[in-house]
Image (spheres, coloured by chain):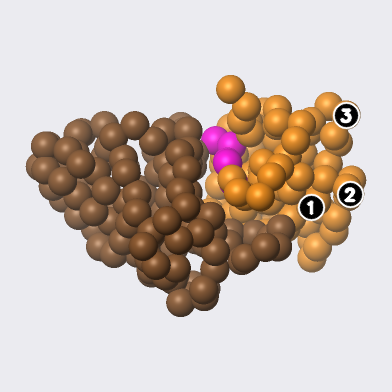
Amino acid sequence: GESVGLHLPTLSVQEGDNSIINCAYSNSASDYFIWYKQESGKGPQFIIDIRSNMDKRQGQRVTVLLNKTVKHLSLQIAATQPGDSAVYFCAENSGGSNYKLTFGKGTLLTVNP
Amino acid sequence: DAGITQSPRHKVTETGTPVTLRCHQTENHRYMYWYRQDPGHGLRLIHYSYGVKDTDKGEVSDGYSVSRSKTEDFLLTLESATSSQTSVYFCAIRHTGVLTEAFFGQGTRLTVV
């Protein structure tokens, strides 16, 4: 079936390094994508989003890249900090008016001091 | 938490009993979602609603039913709970008519013994 997936289930980086978390999606009709961060015991929290008519969007220390040709999404975190340690999920909104939102399995990011 | 409340926050129930989880929002948002989260599976969509009395199945809907009789409440019912339904359940809401992020509740931890 069509679903969102992640290439790397775990990622360990040194404090100050840049982190890149990847996500593959299979639904070519998806029109909107979101990255979430989830800390232990909490609900997912919004980080950044991108529409399918864009290929790059930047926020504060985060950048999302979208490559529709290969159906690939990535989240780049600059100067990673210990507070960035969490599970990161990508989500896709299926095209259409019902706004179905599905998630990938998640990547655990660990930042070592 | 974006005006979204889940109840109860924790519940232990016996196999075969019915269970209803409630998601309540004060934002008047049109779209509401129920997900379950299990280790290794990320967030999986159970059911979602795109309006009062308008609901649809997600990827793991078997054994679950939902109801949305008014905008602010979205109920998830396990007709006869099984141990495989032990999980953390998250409700989410999205703004009406705009491609935007979903806001999540704090989650309900359900244990079926």
Q: Secondary structure at mark 2?
A: loop
Give the magenta range.
Answer: A101-105
Residue placed at 70% from the left, 62% from the top? B98
- In which quadrant of the rendered view does residue B30 lie? bottom right
* In this picture, residue A57 sits left or right of residue A27: right
Depth order, front residue of B70/A49 = B70
Q: Residue furthest top?
A: A1
Residue under pointer 1: A50
Q: Position of residue B74 (x, y in %)?
A: 38, 59
Q: Position of residue A106 (x, y in %)?
A: 57, 39
Residue under pointer 3: A69
Asked if labels 2 and 1 touch by Cβ distance under 8 angstroms, the answer is yes
Depth order, front residue of A113/B77 = B77
- Could you give the CA–CA distance between mark 2 and mark 3, rounded to whole angstroms? 12 Å
* In this picture, residue B69 sits left or right of residue B83: right
Residue placed at 26% from the left, 32% from the top? B84
Discs 2 and 3 share one subunit: yes
Q: Position of residue A109 (x, y in %)?
A: 61, 44
The quarter of the image holding the N terminus of chain A is top right
Marked residue chain, label 2: A
Q: Chief secondary structure of the magenta span?
A: strand
Which of marks 3 and 2 precedes in the sequence?
2
* In this picture, residue B47 sits left or right of residue A86: left
- In which quadrant of the rendered view does residue B31 lie? bottom right
- Identified by mark 3, the residue type is Thr
Discs 1 and 2 share one subunit: yes
Which tint is chain A?
Answer: orange
Residue under pointer 2: A54
Residue placed at 47% from the left, 43% from the top? B56
Output the letter for the chain in brown: B
A19 drawn magenta:
no
